[in-house]
Image (spheres, rainbow, N blue to C red):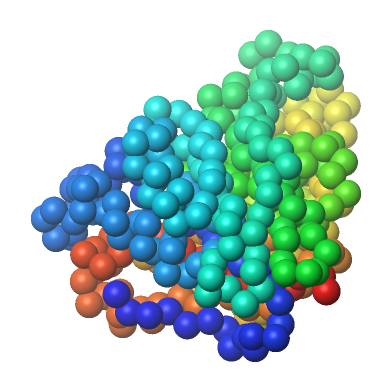
Amino acid sequence: ATARKWFPQQSASQPSFRVLTFNMLAPKYAVFQQFPYATPGVLSFEYRRSLITAEVLRHQPHIFALQEIAETEYKQCFQYDFAAQGYAGFHSAKWVGDGLALFWRTRKNPEDPNGIRIEVESQSLQKITIKHLFKRRHIRSVDSPVDKFLDLMERLPTIFQIGIFNIFSNDNPPLRIALCNTHLHWDPMEPHVKSAQMALICSRLESLNLDIPIIFLGDFNSLPFKTTSDQFDTIPEGTQIESGAYHLATKGRLPWTHVHHPISRQQNLRNWCEQHNKLIDDFPFSFHHNLELSSAYLDVMGAEPKFTNFTQDFKGTLDYIFYSRSRLKAVGVLEMLEESVLIDQIALPNSWYPSDHLSIAADFLLPV
């Protein structure tokens, strides 16, 4: 595999810690019907297992998040593969054959000049149950557009993992952080669902009253922006729109007029809110937060990558590392491969790279 570069080059005297996120492509989705251009054999889990492990370890992260990791593969394979390299972790099922995992380095890497080791303070799966949430707020109405939208949300699990970590580095004071890992809804026809999932997760994060830096990373299945119309969105000529989930994460608010807000996306939902005198900006729930999140790649490189997902039919950025911009400083990111390298084998996955996604990673300064 072609070596990937870091931007910019770091000096060894600058203490930092590294996080990585990688959608590893679950075995249930790694099928010929989805990737007919893949060389025979490269889609088998037996072939991809070592490549997945190598994709993570070559970048030596201190904490990393995986998406599309099935419970079986975690328990029988990756739990042990990464433990042998000094990592502990925990898995959370999303549904059968799909899930999330967080790993952290529990012992120092002899080659790490900062001598970083990590202790986990707490770890949990957060699952947001829509029906319970709205039963408490007394705003459900049988067979209304709101009820149907909430039922849709209930069928699509809104989950995330959260770990509270203490990062120790030589004689420096420890850094206490929260790291959140998620995987939003996949369907490009339903960006309003992704916006709603983002709103619910940010609201839950705020409700935890953590008062520590947050790193929020994963596969958000949302482009940073669009400049041209497609079968999913109409973009006026000469303009662009940020995806709803991305806009909400980085701007802290998604107005109901945004094309990816549920009320803007569904006229019948807007009509119902107006008829029942509901506050459109905050309905079906609040679409604003005060987490003050920035994108590591945007801050370090001045732009998001051209792609993190690269298949024959789609090329675009879906994965992000968001962080508390007032509490952390991103100082480096892992660059993407050139498109010319990837098209040598048509697209991803291939014999060198085990997923349709590339991993992304970022370095953050440690207190001294």
> Which quarter of the picture shows residue 173?
bottom right
**224 or 292, which is in the foreground?**
292
Residue 159 lies, with reference to residue 48, above or below; the image says above
Quarter of the image for the C terminus: give it.
Answer: bottom right
- Where is residue 32? Give x, y as percent: 18, 48
Judged from this view, the residue extending furthest toward the top is 142
Say if 39 sits above or below 34 in the image.
below
| Residue at image location 60% in from the left, 47% down from the top | 181
Q: Is residue 76 in view from this perspective?
A: yes
- At 47% from the left and 37% from the top, the residue drawn is 99
Percent coordinates x, y for residue 328 in the rendering: 79, 67
Looking at this rendering, what residue extends furthest in the left direction? 40
Please state the horizontal and vertical placement of residue 245, each as a whole percent of the image. 65, 52
Residue at position x 83%, y 48% in the image:
289
Quadrant in the rendering for residue 29: top left
97 and 123: which is toward the camera: 123
Quarter of the image with the N terminus in it: bottom left
| Left or right of 190 in this view: 200 | right
Q: Is residue 160 above or below residue 251?
A: above
Does residue 201 appear in the picture of this structure?
Answer: no
